[in-house]
Every structure is written in C-alpha cells, then in structure tokens.
Amino acid sequence: MSDLTPVLRLEDIVKTFPGVRALDGVSLTLLPGEVHALMGENGAGKSTLMKVLGGILKPNEGRIIVGETPVVMSSPLEAKAKGIVFIHQELSLAEELSVAENIYLGELPRKRFGLVDWATLETRTNAILERLKVGFDARTRVGDLSIANQQMVEIARALTVDAKAVIFDEPTASLTDAEKVVLFDVISGLQEQGVGIIYISHRMEEIFKITDRISVLRDGSYRGTVNTADTDEEAVTQLMIGRKLDLTGNESHHELGDVALEVRGLSCGDLFRDINFEVRRGEVVGFYGLVGAGRTEIAETLFGLRDPSAGTILLDGQETVIHSPIDAIARGISLVPEDRKGQGLILGMNCRDNMTLPQVDDLKAGPFVAEGAEVSIFDQYRDRLDIRTPGWKQLVGNLSGGNQQKIVIGKWLSMRPSVLIVDEPTRGIDVGSKSEIHNLIRELAAQGYAVIVISSEMPEVLHVSDRIVAMYSGRIMRTFTSEEVTEDNLIQAISGITPDKAA
Ligand SMILES: Nc1ncnc2c1ncn2[C@@H]1O[C@H](COP(=O)(O)OP(=O)(O)OP(=O)(O)O)[C@@H](O)[C@H]1O
Ligand SMILES: [Mg+2]
C-alpha cells in the first residue's frame, strides 16, 4: 500500500471545548480503497475528529490535506465538494421533507429559471434507493420512516457525490442484520472504486470483519494504528482503555426471592400473542429474538405505552392495570428505552437535571428541590457508569453519543425500581463501559431487583441472564435456564424451529 497517495491526511489536530481538550494533536492517514476503523471509548474524540474533517467544527490547530493539497474545511458543503461525505452518528435529516429532498438538500437539480427539476430528482433518488434495496421511495416523508430507514437515507446521501472519502459514524447502531448486509455491500462497492472509508463502531465483530486498519484514540490522544489482520480484540481493547479488561467475575449467584412480575396470556393485536412468564426478585431474565419478534412491544406494554388486547399483569401477586408510564413508574416499573434519543433525553438540559427528571417530586424539600440530593445522585452514577463530562452543568447535547446513553441508563437506575426493563442496554457503548453495565445489572439483581434485559447481542444475553426467553414472530418459543441454553438451541428457537420440528 506504501506507493499509494493517501486520500487525505489529518495532522496534529487540536480541538478544545470549554473545560474539555477533545482532541490533543491527532493525526490520521486514509488510503484509497481501505476501510479504516476509528476506535476509542465513549468520549475519546472520534466524532469530534470526524466533524473537523467534515467541516462542521473548526480545529484550534492542525492541518487537513486532501490528496496533496492543504485545505480549510469551512463548511459541510465545502467538505462534500472536496469529495468528503459524512454519515452522522446523530441523524441529521429534515423530517418534514421527502427522502429525495433530504438526499439532495442544498443541491437540488434545477431546470431553467431555477425551478426544481422534480422528475430528475425522483429518478436519481430512486436509482440510488434501488441499489440500497430499501422498501420506500423518493417521495416518502422522512419523518414517517423508522430510525433504521432514516439511517439508510443518510447512507444514500453518500452515494450521490463522487466521493473520495466516506465517514460512517456508528452506522449499524440501529440497523437490522439484513440492513447491515446491504451496508457492508455498499462499503465494499465504494472500496472497489478506490474510495477511502473511515468506519466508527464499538462492535468488534464488525471491525474485524470489514476493516483493513484500526486507529485508536484515548482521551483525545492518538494511541496508534494497527493492521486489522495483525491484531485481535484484546490488543485493541487494551489500546483503547489502557488496561486489560476483566471479563470474568460475573458469577454472582444469589438466592432468588418472590415473583415480582408475572404475565399471563398477554396479547397485543398482531404484535405479540399469549405471552406467559415471570420474573423473581434477584433474577435477570433475558429476552432474545430477531428484530420484530415483539420484545420491545412487550416492554412497552408493561410500561404502559401500549394497551394489551388480552391478558393480565401481576405485580407481587396483585393483578395490576397499567395505562401509562406514570402508572408504571408509580408501581415500580422502569423502562430504559431502545430509542434513547427519542424517548430518553432533553438535549438542551444539563446532565444532572436529565438524570433526576423523573424523581424531582421525591427530592423536593418543601417547595424546593434539594439541589444537594440531585447532585449526589448525579455524582454517584457518573462514577459508576464512567460518564465523561466536565461537570453536571454540561448540556447533554454536548456529550458524546455513548455518554448520552449512559445518562439515560443512570436516570432509570437511580429510581431504584422493583422491576427494571432495559432494552438494548449497551447499544453504542464502548467495551469497557459495556462490562461495567453488565456488572451493574447483575448487582441490581443481587440487591433484589427483578430485571428484564432485551438484547440483540447473543453474548450479552448469555452473559447477564439467569433465564432466557426466546421469541419468534410475537410468540415465546422456549424459555431456557442458564444451564440448558446453548448458542445452537437459542438460534433454533428464535428462528421459529421448535425442538420437534428440528428433530
Ligand atoms: N459541542 C461540544 N461542547 C462541549 N463538549 C463537547 C462538544 N462536542 C463534544 N464534546 C466533548 O468532546 C469529547 C469527545 O466527544 P466525541 O463526541 O468526539 O466522542 P466519541 O469518541 O465520538 O464518543 P462516543 O463513542 O460516545 O460517540 C467529549 O468529552 C465530549 O463531551
Ligand atoms: Mg461519537
């Protein structure tokens, strides 16, 4: 590869925010046709570096060289004109506009007299959408699309320009397996055309599957670049977090208590049918299945966001009706939602207030909120979850993506619910914090909480659960104890293969 002229070089980039040195002299070289992973813990500076490259943030120091030419990236449009396309971690689409308008925003094809050429716009857009094998078209309003499909629109944008470099910032966080296959096809297509790809993800399997080189940041500093073929997960993790990760020590066995939650014959239209299970105090029950199996919908029903069409919910043996999240919270049920962006956070509010929002009433001393109590809750969970922020006053919108997720998790944990439901608890979370969150889940169970963990990551459910409920197409196929479960019988169950049929 040494005879290739790099697509671009970043040299000694420094970027500071008030109280934070987000990038401390970082350099990176991107070669044509390579997939270059950018890794590091939550808050390490990955998105910031890419925002500098993409013309969104101005660096305090450093140079950007595209091909052989030093450039100043003064805006995203300028970056795009230089062939650098950025697919964001936080979706940045205009919900009110159509898919086509979003894809060509700022450069809509025009006819004479400056009128938008809608026919051309649609034909071009649909041609790209076809390549991506998506189930919507140019006219669809972006606000009507699922998060995953909105992500596909972001990806479609990348294919409209003659790109030299494409940056993917955690593109798979909300994609299904089928959509991931399409994305990886797109990436290898770009690669064949000699486009350089920068790929940010916390998912090691992906990194080792599709990347050629890996560069690592830690606390805003550059830690090194390695060939993917010459390294392994452990070495990369060590480079990222500066220590070895202790993945053992989770064998906490404790006595199970009474049944905290029991669900009998619960159904909700076509979403799920005849669901029966129980969770004891001290127990972690994992829900595993493919996207669309109905797991999130069950969680939403237990949390009062959906009304069941049949069945009963019992809390501590008492039949209960839950019509709203307020009912659920009052009865001791908390849900850490899957879509934390949409349902969990107020970006323009500070870290502390976001975390203590649901319990302001409890913290009130007379007419005032006891500020000390709020700050101490925040401090406790900041330490526990290793939330990187200069202080509680920082606006949540200024935190890195993964640290925002930790705030939401802290918010629901700090309510000390008796039944805690967490939906995809470690999506977007770095490896170090991931095992910390797993330990925390086990610890909460040990303290007597009943915990439901919904996850699409098999190692995660296997690791944290005492029992695993396998779902397929709105039904429970089988419930496994941790002794009987294997990867094979779990995969069979979630593919809809019953033991009889398999035999
Ligand atoms: N607009 C901003 N104002 C203040 N601080 C910021 C701003 N943007 C980023 N930061 C800080 O800069 C640091 C690096 O953040 P960045 O978003 O680059 O992290 P990241 O590596 O992308 O993490 P993640 O894996 O969680 O997405 C963090 O400490 C973050 O809080
Ligand atoms: Mg980021």
Image (cartoon, rainbow, N blue to C red):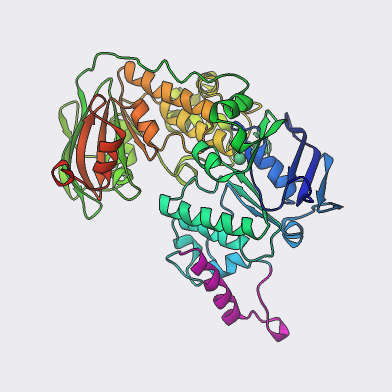
> 7 above or below 263?
below
Residue located 43% across and 29% down the image: 359
> 347 above or below 123?
above
**On the picture, is 51 further left or further right than 66?**
left
Instruction: Report x, y in % for residue 368.
Output: 50, 25
Closer-to-camera residue (85/492):
492
Let me know if residue 109 appears in the view. Answer: yes
> 369 above or below 348?
above
Residue farthest along the bottom direction in this orientation: 112
112 in magenta: yes
**On the picture, is 391 further left or further right than 265?**
right
Closer-to-camera residue (254/330):
254
Let me know if residue 367 appears in the view. Answer: no
Count of labels in the image: 0
Closer-to-camera residue (228/495):
228
> 219 above or below 446?
below
Q: Quadrant of residue 105?
A: bottom right
Range shown magenta = 107-133
Instruction: Report x, y in % for residue 135.
Output: 42, 65
Instruction: Report x, y in % for residue 152.
Output: 51, 58
**On the picture, is 137 further left or further right than 386?**
left
Q: Quadrant of residue 404?
A: top right
475 in magenta: no
Which image quarter is the C terminus in? top left
Q: Quadrant of residue 217?
A: top right
Residue located 56% across and 33% down the image: 403
* Magenta span main SS: helix
Closer-to-camera residue (332/29):
29
Quadrant of ligand 2: it is top right
